[in-house]
């Protein structure tokens, strides 16, 4: 069976109509459905955002420290 036949929406409707009703206690739809893409391929945007803000904070601390050092070194 081709990918189009397996995963197309029209084929799923046809298979649903043609399939016999499931017996008691078993649900054939649960075993055939695919997980959401967000579960299968989780996004790493939160990690990137955390690194970005931590880098900005570190640069700010370095800037403040550098300005204090510059002010103390060249002041009378």
Image (spheres, rainbow, N blue to C red):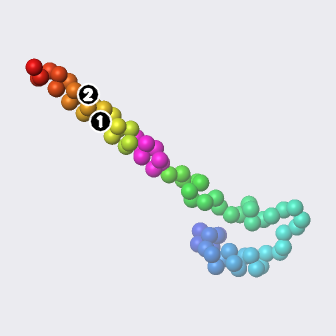
The N terminus - image quarter? bottom right
Give the main secondary structure of the magenta stretch: helix
The quarter holding residue 64 reads: top left
Which residue position holds label 2? 65
49 part of magenta stretch: yes
Could you tell me residue 9's position as x and y percent? Answer: 63, 75
Q: Residue lying furthest right in this view?
A: 24
Secondary element at tag 1: helix
Callout 2–callout 1 Cβ contact below 8 Å: no
Above or below: residue 45 compared with residue 8: above
Residue drawn at x 59%, y 54% as measured from the top left: 39
Q: For the image shown, how many numbered marks are present on the structure?
A: 2
Residue drawn at x 74%, y 76% as measured from the top left: 16
Which residue position holds label 1? 59
The C terminus - image quarter? top left
Of residue 20 and residue 45, the one placed in the foreground of this image is: 45
Magenta-tinted stretch? 44-51
């Amino acid at each position: 069976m081709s990918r189009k036949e397996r995963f197309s929406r029209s084929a799923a409707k046809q298979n649903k109509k043609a399939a016999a009703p499931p017996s008691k206690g078993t649900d054939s739809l649960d075993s055939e459905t695919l997980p959401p893409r967000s579960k299968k391929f989780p996004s790493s945007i939160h990690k990137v955002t955390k690194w970005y803000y931590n880098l900005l904070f570190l640069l700010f601390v370095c800037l403040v420290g550098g300005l204090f050092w510059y002010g103390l070194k060249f002041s009378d």
